[in-house]
Image (spheres, rainbow, N blue to C red):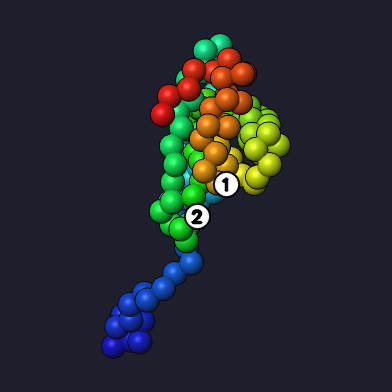
Amino acid sequence: MSVRSNTRLVYSTDTGGVCAGCGWPRRDCKCSRPRAGTEPVPTRIVAKLRMEKKGRGGKTVTVVYGLPRNAAFLKSLCSELKRSCGTGGAVLDDGVEVQGELRDRVRDVLEQKGYLVTG
């Protein structure tokens, strides 16, 4: 009896192939995921506001969501909201997050830009 017939594979770095489209391993293929930042910006934008506290150590943030998934649009909107509110913020998948409870100020800025605001 040889040593090989009695062994089993414990760990392997083999990924099972590489995707021809994106070059990632097939199990982590990025082709099937939607690409961020490609959605066109509509003429009529409806922005939704909400306040969040969960997972932030008790700090409150104002979240503007329901926006088109266009990276350039979200980045410019985020910088404008941060500048007008005087706080920090971040771009999310389909929205913008502004630090602090600034719902009224954010609503005013969005309405001045001609967006319909709910929430």
How many discs appear? Answer: 2
Mark 1: which secondary structure?
A: strand
Point out the image quarter for the N terminus. Answer: bottom left
Q: Residues within 10 Å of mark 1 (few under 14, many from 20)?
A: some
**Residue on which the image places disc 2:** 59
Instruction: Give the answer, above or below, for where 40 lies relative to 83.
Output: above
Give percent across and percent down for residue 30. Answer: 50, 42
Location of mark 1 (residue): 99
Q: Viewed as shown, does residue 80 lie left or right of 2? A: right
Q: Residues within 10 Å of mark 2 (few under 14, many from 20)?
A: few
Q: Where residue 90 sits in the image (x, y, percent)?
A: 60, 44
Tell me which amino acid carries mark 1.
Gln
Q: Nearer the viewer, residue 44 or 71?
A: 44
Instruction: Point out the residue furthest to the front here.
Output: 104
* Residue 26 rendering spot, x and y as whole percentages: 46, 48
Return the residue nearer the eye: 102 or 96. 102
